Amino acid sequence: MLSESLLATRTNNMGSSAIREILKVVAKPGIVSLAGGIPAPEAFPMQHINKLTQLVLEKYGSTALQYGTTEGFMPLREALVEYFKGLGITSTAEEINITTGSQGVLDSLAKIFISPGDPLAVEAPTYLGAIQAFNPYEPNYVQMETDEDGLIPESMEEVIKKHHPKMVYLIPTFQNPTGRTIPVERRKKIAEIAKATDTLVIEDDPYGQLRYRGEFQTPIKVFAPDHVIYCGTFSKIFAPGLRLGFYLAPKFVREWLVKAKQGVDLHTSSLSQTLATEFLNGGYLENHLPKIIELYRPRQEAMLNAMEKFFPDSFTWSKPEGGMFIWAEGPKGMNILELYNEAIENHVAFVPGKYFYTDKGAGEETMRLNFTMADEATITAAIERLAQAMNKVVTR
């Protein structure tokens, strides 16, 4: 009988997603989940899908269903040139490649750059999905310090000088899990450090378009174009099921990413790419994005207001200007898993923050809360029940 002894040693680093396991629990009837990180179904442009599908089949014919180039569908890459221009990034279609979700490029980056034991610098905390993508390649994670304004540039500089990481991975705008955004002056410093130390920076930007207040922050890519890989996705502004991501990278990195992708999936779905092409070229994004923002803004405000009203004074939390998450921290020494279990008894769920750290023992008193998947009244009631659980645990 076949056994697990056949597995490669790298599978030792391929654990199940903690969040996916949590979502199995919260799928039970009656539990309000503030745990997931997925867009609300109401945010999908359902009213346009039939029209877009008919359009791409008429316009592109069998091309929409045929094999395509690994780099991506050229009309989509051309459309993304204009998209990038709106972010202040100058590019050409040849410099832009398409991926199967932005998760795909994270795996490929680790595959081509990380050998077992190589240092990889990440924010503390950082995106759990990135940790999962990087783990099979056995990096030696080095945590960089953060505060209310995100990554502290001096910490990044110190880590680079001491550890010489192969890559620095960042989510500068509405970070997952904290929701924090790095201000432009820090972004300039990060760019200067990258250039001065000849360091490769991954700028992951899945949430940047979801801004509810405040001012746009220029991507780090603008300040250090030759040292930054900018990654984006259609998952939060179109539909996650299309599995469409994209990146803008230096030439030699781009060439190796194409080689890595050819060995995995040859190319990204042609039908998805043609749909995204017309979504951009037809002005659908400009019309639909405000609707997404108007859906999420009051939900975020409801959560922040409820936290202000119900949470114990011993807790603090982020106050993001956009994105999908709020990060909360309890008193030192609090057992977040005890709170999680108490919260489940109160029919509300969240993600313990410790899963977003690469160092064991870090973030034991933290949690990530998501507000996109419930309406304002449900969020308010859920936060009140969560606060009741907090009061029980904190006073024990």
Image (cartoon, helix red, strand yellow):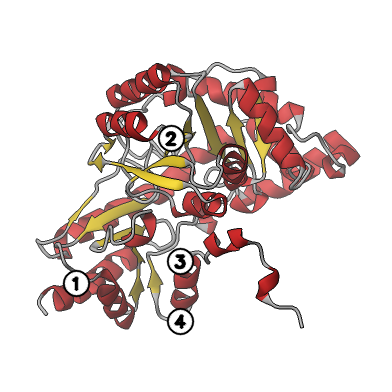
Mark-to-mark CA distance, 1 and 3: 22 Å
Query: Would you call the spot at circle 2 few (<14 residues within 10 Å), some (14-19), or many (20 or more)?
Result: many
- Marks 4,3: beta carbons within 8 A: no
Provide the residue designation for mark 2: 165
Query: Would you call the spot at circle 1 few (<14 residues within 10 Å), some (14-19), or many (20 or more)?
Result: many
Q: Residue at x 44, y 71 (%)?
A: 22
- Specify whether residue 16 is in view: yes
Query: Would you call the spot at circle 4 few (<14 residues within 10 Å), some (14-19), or many (20 or more)?
Result: few
Marks 4 and 1, the one that precedes in the sequence: 4
Give residue 268's quadrant in the image: top right
- Residue kind at label 2, given as amino acid type: Pro
SS of the residue under disc 2: loop
* Nearer to us: label 3 or label 2: 2
Q: Is residue 277 left or right of residue 16?
A: right
- Residue kind at label 3, given as amino acid type: Ala
- Marks 4,1: beta carbons within 8 A: no
- Residue kind at label 4, given as amino acid type: Pro
